[in-house]
Amino acid sequence: MAKTKIDNATTTHDAVATNASIPSVELVFGGFNVLSDDLPIESVVYLLQYGFAQCLQDMSLAQIRAQAERKGLEMTTAEVAEALEARRAEKVKNLLNGTIFIRKVGAPRATSFDKLVAQIVKERLTAAVLKKGVALPKGDAYHTLAESFMAKRGDEVRAEAQRRLDTVVSIDVDDLDNLF
């Protein structure tokens, strides 16, 4: 098949070869489903271009700026734009390698217990810094503080998390009738 540049501003139905080999795929969304074999090549090209553009548009400058702020970092407009371009380039590389849907190995998902432990740590650290009249650190500084706190008070925090979970499990919904 000849290479043809297709973008959101160009329609080139006649330039697309009709002998393209596309695997049969069932496309599903919101109760609708279509087999790719049933689509004319022009529709497949449209979906490919739309999907390509959408996957690169899913990342935004605001998203990158918000992620930096959560980490306690400040970025200039140029740095945010550069980070966006780098992320988009990485996504294109993953598309070309066929690894776009492969999840990178990372930390396992937190259990309800682990989430509760993290919540209790944050509650206690927040109370402690309020007493001192300082702000709770963000980003790596917060994680270092939380790790230090858990090293000293981890048993106490885990016991409180278990107590809270046990309390929730023992609540009978019928006992809550007067609240509704």
Image (cartoon, rainbow, N blue to C red):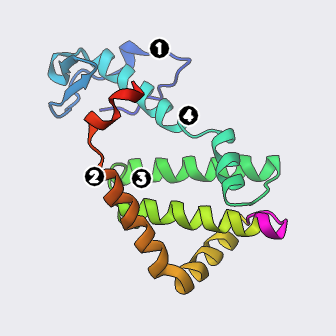
Quickly name the residue at label 2: 170
Q: Determine which quarter of the picture holds residue 176.
A: top left
**Residue depicted at x 33% and y 28%:** 177
Quickly name the residue at label 1: 11
Q: CA distance from mark 1 to mark 3?
A: 26 Å
**Up/down of 179 relative to 131, above or below:** above
Tag 4: amino acid: Gln
The disc, 1 or 2, on the residue closer to the chain's N-terminal end is 1
Tag 1: amino acid: Thr
The disc, 4 or 3, on the residue closer to the chain's N-terminal end is 4
Q: CA distance from mark 2 to mark 3?
A: 48 Å
Tag 2: amino acid: Ser
Q: Determine which quarter of the picture holds residue 144.
A: bottom right
Q: CA distance from mark 4 to mark 3?
A: 15 Å
State the quadrant of the N terminus.
Answer: top left
Q: Range of the magenta residues?
A: 130-136
Left or right: 128 as drawn, with respect to 44: right
- For the residue pair 93 and 113, the one nearer the viewer reads as 113
**Residue depicted at x 59% and y 79%:** 149
